[in-house]
Amino acid sequence: MAPTALICDTQPWKDLKAHVGDIKKTHLRELMADTERCKQMLLEFDGITLDYSRQQATVDTLKKLQKLAEAAHLKDKIERMFSGEHINSTENRSVLHVALRAPRDAVVKCDGKNVVPDVWKVLDQIKDFSDKVRNGSWVGATGKPLTDVISVGIGGSFLGPLFVHTALQTDPEASKQAKGRQLRFLANVDPIDVARNIAGLNPETTLVVVVSKTFTTAETMLNARTLRTWISKELGPSAVAKHMVAVSTNLMLVEKFGIDPKNAFAFWDWVGGRYSVCSAVGVVPLSLQYGFSVVEKFLSGAWSIDKHFSSAPFEKNLPVLLGLLSVWNVSFLGYPARAILPYSQALEKFAPHIQQVSMESNGKGVSIDGVPLPLETGEIDFGEPGTNGQHSFYQLIHQGRVIPCDFIGVIKSQQPVYLEEEIVNNHDELMSNFFAQPDALAYGKTHEQLLKENVPDHLIPHKTFTGNRPSLSLLLSSLGAYKIGQLLAIYEHRVAVQGFIWGINSFDQWGVELGKSLATQVRKQLHASRAKKEPVQGFNPSTTTLLNKYLKESSD
Ligand code: F6P
């Protein structure tokens, strides 16, 4: 196939470049004064309100972005994703995480075959297994119920499930189902993480779920072996069959590890690691903790966005609009970072998950055809829940660098309001900040305002805020399993939109491989040098010095 033209060579790209000058001349204060514009930049879908009026964009900018979407063949690319084409061309794979949340009667095809029945076969298997563990008909080797679960996995086999678990923990419906149960996550190969995970746990009541798409990831396999030893030392080697199960696409390696493939939950190579939370990767640990019916609601929330993404016109399409605006911020306005700021403690692990989804997907140096890109892709994602972030890095956002912010708020809190007698209750207090911060960023504070407030002259420069700092607000009606699924899918598809526009492959991750292979060389040398009690050789002077210092002082 002939290489596709680079997006930066198209006319709509050039038009947007030329348009930047007009936008930079206009302050957000002026843009926000236009009531009609503000109305047009508000979108509601199924309990989610998006307000993007505080973006440095006009209605004309949006039209130009739509033209860019046409030039990038965005519609066609979305259709190709949903129809199971091998759009992950460097790995020759389909990208079908949407099939993971499809209802039983839906049809999603991969290589001509409807994969939905396979998805549901595994979901039914998970329901059956998690019901048995939860109702005590599957017990540990000593006959005790398995109330505690450690999910062992890293990257996409960890961050998504951790985000959803953290978000469900305080949801009244989900937490009722989790009574008396614990779910922990072991990801880091650092022995401290193992120690923290097993602290206070009794192997007799613990079930370990080893989660790895490849079943070769060094950190996960070492952690899995460590927990296998912990179980067999305490309960005998035969206990492993009752206390360890697996989630993987590689059932052969699962068996080789010593886990009965009957106790393994499969998924498929058309599910990318960072897009796998809706597969057995997330569904097994989350169903064990909250029961399958809660997880089913999470899946249907994600599916509602999948349908919306694949069918809504672009000007009313949440992930498309968010993706286009991010491209505008990164590639045209030149803002390389994005802050994800949920005003909900339950979403505290959302930004770390999106960091992987976004940065592993879109941090690429070449086009999908392998042509070096003359433009930068991806953005630096980071974030903390409000109001904690306000007392940490907001100073920089208000007065230092311009960082487009996503403010995420919830209308009905998961938790009751404690101090009703206060003038403003706890949730209102939180949400007052959610509403105030975007305006503070957009409007700033002028010299004249400070003069009126009698601020001493010498402090005026320090207290002046230029404003004109873009943000968008996502207001969710509530935060139950369904909404959490919706939020996840919005961000997954937004990242795909950005990648489709930039013309890159958002579904491979070759960049991660380099570090992995270097670590393998170091590991081999460390083993050899420790065994022979000899210094390491063959690295550059800096690495050699540090490795030898480490070897010497760690064996002292
Ligand atoms: O970080 C690289 C990566 O390949 C991710 O894409 C993936 O989610 C993670 O490693 C874990 O891989 P696995 O599930 O195969 O253990």
Image (cartoon, rainbow, N blue to C red):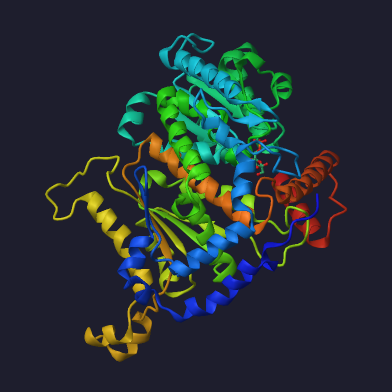
On screen, 408 above or below 13?
above
Picture quarter containing residue 58?
A: bottom left
| Residue 446 seen anywhere in this rendered image of the structure | yes
Residue at 46%, 25% in the rendered image: 287
Image quarter for residue 365?
A: bottom right
Residue in view at x 53 percent, y 27 percent: 106
Horizontal and vertical percent for residue 246? 61, 23
Please give the name of the residue rendered at 47% of the width and 32% of the height, measured from the top-left corner. 299
The single residue placed furthest to the bottom in the displayed view is 457
Q: How many marks?
A: 0
The image quadrant where one finds ligand 1 is top right
The residue nearer to you, when weighing 517 against 27, is 27
- Is residue 94 left or right of 440 when viewed as pictured? right
Which residue is situated farthest in the right direction here? 538
User: In the image, residue 266 lies at what x, y percent?
Assistant: 63, 24
Residue drawn 83% across and 59% down? 540
Q: Nearer the viewer, residue 101 or 257?
A: 101
Position of residue 251 measured from the top left corner of the image (x, y, whole percent): 70, 22
* Left or right of 496 in this view: 473: left
User: Do we see residue 190 in this rendering?
Assistant: no
Q: Is residue 62 above or below residue 320?
A: below
Horizontal relation, residue 285 to residue 374: left or right: left
Residue 506 higher or lower than 307, as above or below: below
Q: Position of residue 445 (x, y in %)?
A: 32, 78
Viewer-proximal residue among 418 and 489: 489
